[in-house]
Image: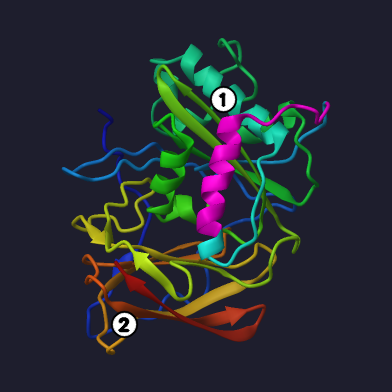
Amino acid sequence: MMRRPRKTGGSRCQQSTTVAALGAALLAATLLAVAPPAVRSAPLAPAASGARPVYLPAMAKPAAAPSPAAAISDTAQRAAARLNVYRALAGLPQVAAHPLLTRAAESHARYYVLNAGDPSLQGLGLHRQTPGQPGFSGVEPQDRARAAGYGAGADVTVDENVGLLGDPERLIEAFVDTVNHRWNMLHPSLVDLGYGMANDPAIDVLQLALAWSLRGVAQPARYPGPNQTDVPRSSYIWEAPDPAPGAPRPLGYPITIAFPLSARVAYGAAELRTAAGERVAVYTAQKAWLRGLAIIPARPLQPATGYVVAVSGTRDGVPLQETWSFVTR
C-alpha cells in the first residue's frame, strides 16, 4: 500500500458561469540552451475505493556513446506499443523503444531493487542515485542516459516518469489518466523512449526523449483527441505535482494540449462546454517547458455526452484558436 503524495503545484477552479482567462504568458521557466532544469514528480497511490493507481516524472539530457547494439527488451516494446495506441488517438506519430534509453531505464530499476528501503529513495529522491551505492549508474536521469550511451543530438532532453506497478501496459494506462505524466508521453516533440522494470519490489522507469528542434509534428497534441469516443468520465489524478490541489476527487477526465518544444506559446482563454452549449466548471494548469495546458473538469463528466474544448492564445506571436470535440462513454 503506497502513501498518497503531498500536493504541490498550482491551478484554479472556474465557475460554471465563467471561464477565467489563463495567464497571458506561460508559467516562468528558465530553459537552458540544450535542456531545461530537472523537473521531477513523486510516485502516486490510489486514495479511494475503486481508484486506479497512478504514478509519476523527472528529467535528463543526451549522452556519450557506447555501442547501440543493445537488444530492446520485450517489456520496452510492450510499453511503446501501448503508448502508441494513445498517441494515435491524439493524432501523433508512433514512437519506438530505443535500446540505449532502455538500458538507462533498466539500470535505474536495478538500482531501486538493490537499494530498496533506503531513505534517500523516498519522495522525489526516487529519481536520484547516490554514488557508491550498489548499482550506481548516475546521480540524475540525464547522467544515466549519458552513461548508457544515449546521444540523439544536443537538442534532446530526456524526461523520466517512474511508477511502482511493474507492468508496462498498466503503467502507460495509469499515466494517460493523469496530467503531468500524460503531457510528456503524448507530446509532438517525443522522439524516443526507454522502459525498464522490476517486480521485487515493483518499479517502472520510463525515459522519454523530446527534441527542441522541430523533428516531430508541427501541430499540437490534444487528448482526448478530436472526435474521440468512449472517453472515460472521471479520474482521481493522484499525482505530484497535483494539477488541482485541494480539489475533491474524483474529478472529471482531464483534457490536455501540448505544442512542440520549438514553439513559443502563451495561452489565453480555455473552456469546456457540452455539445448543447452548457459551460463546465474546470480547473486549469500549465507546464511551461512542455508548452502544455490542462483543463480538468471539477466533477465527473456526464455519460454518453459530447463535449467541445476551446483554447485560445498565441503561438510564436500569432493568434491561435484550437477547438475540438469528444464523446464520453
Residue 327 in the image: state x and y as whole percent.
Answer: 34, 74
Q: Are marks 1 and 2 in contact (CB under 8 Å)?
A: no
Q: Is residue 160 visible?
A: no
> Label 2 sits on what residue type?
Arg
Q: Which residue is mark 1?
A: 108
Using residue 213 as the reference point, say whether residue 232 is left or right of it: left
Q: Quadrant of residue 62?
A: top right
Q: Is residue 217 visible?
A: yes
Residue 2, compared with residue 264, is above or below; it is: above
Q: Quadrant of residue 141?
A: top right
Please say whether residue 75 is one of the residues in the magenta stretch: yes
Residue 267, compared with residue 206, is above or below; it is: below
Quarter occupied by the C terminus: bottom left
- Describe the element under mark 2 as helix, strand or loop: strand
Q: Nearer the viewer, residue 290 or 326?
A: 326
- Which of discs 1 and 2 lies nearer the camera? The answer is 2
Q: Main secondary structure of the magenta part?
A: helix
Give the extent of the magenta segment: 67-87
Q: Residue at x 65, y 20 (%)?
A: 137
Please say whether residue 202 is one of the residues in the magenta stretch: no
Numbered badge on residue 273: 2
Numbered badge on residue 269: none
